[in-house]
Image (cartoon, helix red, strand yellow):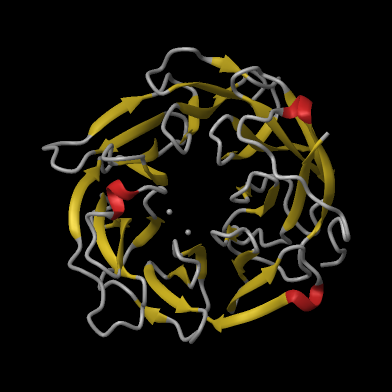
């Protein structure tokens, strides 16, 4: 499941946001471009929140937080990267390039092919806690991969990846967890807490009907949960309590909505507009999203329990098409958000927003 023209809030003391602190108790203390480099992958936070990784057209980079131009570090040359992700121990970056998964150790940043399969599109690490990780051998972490086959079906695999990617033993043998129906396109992959398995958010070929495909270890078949017609971009919260999604609006736009995982408690969080980049906070109760209006993009957050909202800031993306999708990544402590254009030709700059308690 796989980044500066100005220093953000230099010299400020940023308060850690307590779990559950909502928009009425928060304010923006920093909002600026993180790097002068044009990213072609979404940003990814290091587990300790001190660095952000991303890819340019020909290399993988890391940058320290708070960022300054001299903090950018070219980690490894690797072209065609669409996603990057940190290993749970923060010592290795994983990169998806050309449907293959590479590992880049920080101590010896030479890209190494990790698994002998092609067509990989998503990687998801297990959540914090001993249950899923305990099934991996010592020195390894159990990850899940979504790979597209030649027949266009998507298979989800479980594989034990060494914490030391230079380990000559290499990864364990991939184990098939299940498949996503061939008429659906996977948009995201997440590992649910405990032994609940993984969930793939998928859409039909027209992108206007969402499905959640639950794959549980040991189950004979996957469980498919449809969302009502016109709902799309479904995204389960980190602990699996809620599902965020976009609901089609009559004027061709959409509205940001959320509901409980069982489909009850549906709540509309915004008026109609052009939204993308749904992202859950680590606490699983705050939802961030990007709203496009003309040639400007606003970053906003909403509390799914109360409906309270906060406009974090707005900016004008340089050289980004007006219909581009945006990706948002929350920092591990819930006080920072890195965001920018999603994967694809709409390459652009990564921005950083910082929140603090009022």
Q: Look at the image and tell me in which quarter the C terminus lies.
A: top right
Q: Position of residue 283 (x, y in %)?
A: 56, 36
Q: Is residue 265 above or below residue 277?
A: above
* Res 113 seen here: yes
Residue found 47% across the figure and 26% down from its top = 242
Q: Quadrant of residue 222?
A: top left
Residue at the location (37% across, 31% down)? 211
Name above or below for residue 56 compared with residue 74: above
Residue 294 appears anywhere in the view? no
Q: Is residue 308 above or below residue 286?
A: above
Q: Quadrant of the N terminus?
A: bottom left
Q: Nearer the viewer, residue 357 or 3?
A: 357
Q: Residue at x 39, y 46 (%)?
A: 189
Query: Which x, y percent locates residue 46?
Result: 57, 62
Question: Residue 162: horizontal and vertical position, in percent?
Answer: 31, 72
Q: How many numbered markers are drawn?
A: 0
Q: 310 left or right of 159?
A: right
- Foreground of the two, 18 or 66: 18
At which x and y percent is residue 60? 58, 75
The residue that appears at 25% across and 73% down in the rendered structure is 116
Work out which residue is located at the far left of the displayed protein and give it: 220
Q: From this view, report whether residue 257 is shown above or below residue 155.
A: above
């Amino acid at each position: 499941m796989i980044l500066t023209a100005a220093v953000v809030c230099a010299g400020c003391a940023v308060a850690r946001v307590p779990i559950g602190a909502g928009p009425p108790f928060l304010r923006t203390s920093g909002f600026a471009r993180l790097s002068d480099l044009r990213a072609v992958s979404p940003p990814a936070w290091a587990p300790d929140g001190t660095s952000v990784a991303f890819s340019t057209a020909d290399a993988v980079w890391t940058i320290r937080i708070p960022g300054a131009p001299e903090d950018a570090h070219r980690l490894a040359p690797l072209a065609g990267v669409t996603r990057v992700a940190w290993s749970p121990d923060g010592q290795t970056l994983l990169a998806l390039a050309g449907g293959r998964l590479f590992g880049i150790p920080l101590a010896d940043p030479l890209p190494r092919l990790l698994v002998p399969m092609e067509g990989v599109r998503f990687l998801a690490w297990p959540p914090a806690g001993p249950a899923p990780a305990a099934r991996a051998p010592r020195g390894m972490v159990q990850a899940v991969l979504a790979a597209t086959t030649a027949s266009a079906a998507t298979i989800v695999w479980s594989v034990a990846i060494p914490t030391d990617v230079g380990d000559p033993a290499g990864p364990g043998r991939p184990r098939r967890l299940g498949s996503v129906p061939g008429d659906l396109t996977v948009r995201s992959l997440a590992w649910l807490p405990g032994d609940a398995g993984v969930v793939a958010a998928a859409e039909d070929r027209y992108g206007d009907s969402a499905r959640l495909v639950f794959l549980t270890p040991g189950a004979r078949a996957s469980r498919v949960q449809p969302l009502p017609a016109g709902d799309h971009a479904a995204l389960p919260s980190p602990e699996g309590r809620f599902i965020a999604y976009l609901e089609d609006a009559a004027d061709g736009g959409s509205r940001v909505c959320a509901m409980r995982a069982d489909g009850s408690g549906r709540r509309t969080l915004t008026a109609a507009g052009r939204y993308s980049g749904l992202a859950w906070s680590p606490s699983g109760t705050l939802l961030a999203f990007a709203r496009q209006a003309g040639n400007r993009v606003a970053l906003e957050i909403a509390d799914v329990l109360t409906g309270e909202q906060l406009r974090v800031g707005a900016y004008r993306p340089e050289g980004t098409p007006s219909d581009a999708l945006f990706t948002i990544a929350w920092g591990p402590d819930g006080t920072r958000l890195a965001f920018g254009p999603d994967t694809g030709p709409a390459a652009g700059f990564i921005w950083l927003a910082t929140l603090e308690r009022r």
